[in-house]
Image (cartoon, grey):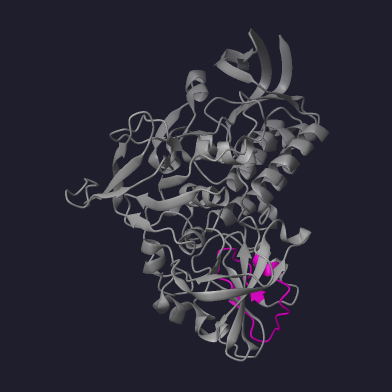
Amino acid sequence: MKRYDLIVVGAGPAGLSAAIEAARCGMKVAVFDENAKPGGQLFKQIHKFFGSKEHQAKIRGYKIGETLLAEADESGVEVFLNATVAGIYLDKEVLVQIGEAMTHFKADTIIIATGAAENMVTFDGWTLPGVIGAGAAQTMMNLYGIKPGQRVLMLGSGNVGLVVSFQLMQAGCEVVALVDAAPRIGGYGVHAAKIARCGVPFYLSHTITKADGTDCVTGVTIAEVDEAFTPIPGTEKHFDVDTICLAVGLSPMSQLLKMAGCTMVDDPSRGGQVPLVSENGETSIPGLFAAGDVSGIEEASSAMIGGRMSGLAAAAYLGFLSEQDKDKRLADLEIALDSLHQGMFAPGSKGQTFAKTDEGIAVSQSLLKKGYLDDTDLERFFHRSDQTDKKSGIRPVIECTQNIPCNPCQDACTKGCIKIGKTITALPRIDANSICTGCGLCIASCSGQAIFLVDEDYAPGYASITLPYEFLPLPQKGQLGTALSRSGQPLGTAEIIDVRSAKAFDHTTLVTIKVPVAQAMTARFFKPATHAAGQ
């Protein structure tokens, strides 16, 4: 029987982070993962992360995964792939199936980081080929380069549903609608806004009632629901689609923890059946820890911090790290984790409705119900004293109107135009005394694609708008197309006057369009005349 100081089950963001911290403390660490590739969800995530430098903000998920794998290798962590942990027994012994063999391993500490599984919903036709989970769609697109379908309807408006909807469009799919039984969009408004300006409608307080087709999906029917989430007869709407994508939440994969005899609790706010853990992830069984989504559904940034904390706690448990050093390092991690647990989307705020931002500004109801800001919102958010600098030339317009944990724009601006302050969830402010050079680093750094550079004095009667663009093929200078509003409605002809790509932009291209000056605060997307957006 092979022995280790620490066995980690799961090579996702939490598991790898835990293994790295423990190995750096001198522990002999093995990581087992049932998949053929390590990294868990990270390698599906081509979008940029939120948070701050400490949370690896503005870095795309797959690049974070590459970094973690390199650090694990440098730290001497042994990673076993295609290795399914079939059981966990007394005295921290695990049974692992590797190939055809069942092998026993033993450790002095164990960290369970098995993550979560996608939830499903049932409706007439839900077992037809073409009904898939959002995670499956990401796997097809981002790992194997396969389009899940041509015309897709997304069910679920949380961050997963919003992010995957945008990635479907990037892959060349047409997203015909985004549906949710809830009366409000569940994810970040900036994610919803970049979908809405591509012309995708939101149907809230709606659910799927039927998938059409015999051998595969050929269409879908949705209907409005009442307060009890019961479909209302006569409100049905039909869409011709070949794919129905479901993003209706995750459930912790906590079976191994139950098998080990850990004290479990049923906590809907954490995703369901989860272990009772200390602040460092230790379960009711000494030396057995849980990290990441298996102990409560959160974003990957939180999972990585939680994994690091469990790795350090395991090292201290076996004496590889002094209690003093452990407390010092954990204190820094707790500060980083706490900053992610602030604002409107904090774990403790689930289910709450916020009428105002922390700054006292009324929350946009249009953003919550339609996915975009309306004219009334512009008055409140962009005609404030910190947004009314009327100096001629380029100025940044930041359409980030919710208290979410993110501040890369502040760090990106070398001229100090953008201010957030020490509270990471504060709304970005524009410093009226600074001068924007138009470098565009703030646009490329924004994980929510919510920053635009506007020059209302570009030419007589015309304004220029620089916007983020992450579709292929890229438009070319001089190309004509259509300017779209925040709601995806056509405003008229727009001309590409500049296209900028740079390594520092990390695959976010800056596209500058020329529009009539009256559209300076309404045009927010460019649709090429030669092809549909995203194709």
Numbered range of the magenta stretch: 418-443
Q: Count numbered badges in the picture.
A: 0
Residue 347 shows up from this direction: no
Q: Is residue 521 left or right of residue 217?
A: right
Q: Position of residue 348 (x, y in %)?
A: 44, 51
Please report the residue visible at 39 percent of the width from the left and 78 percent of the height from the top: 376
Give residue 74's quadrant in the image: top right
Q: Is residue 295 left or right of residue 267?
A: right
Please report the residue visible at 39 percent of the width from the left and 59 percent of the height from the top: 201
414 magenta-colored = no
* Quarter in which the N terminus is drawn: top right
Residue 32 shows up from this direction: yes
Give residue 292's quadrant in the image: top right
Q: Position of residue 372 (x, y in %)?
A: 44, 66
Q: Is residue 160 above or below residue 397?
A: above
Q: Is residue 23 above or below residue 527?
A: above
Which of the two residues, 365 or 126, is positioned nearer the viewer here? 126
Q: Position of residue 528 (x, y in %)?
A: 57, 64
Residue reaching furthest to the left? 233
Q: Is residue 197 left or right of residue 60?
A: left
Which of the two residues, 170 or 370, is positioned nearer the viewer here? 170
Which of the two residues, 490 or 19, is positioned nearer the viewer here? 490
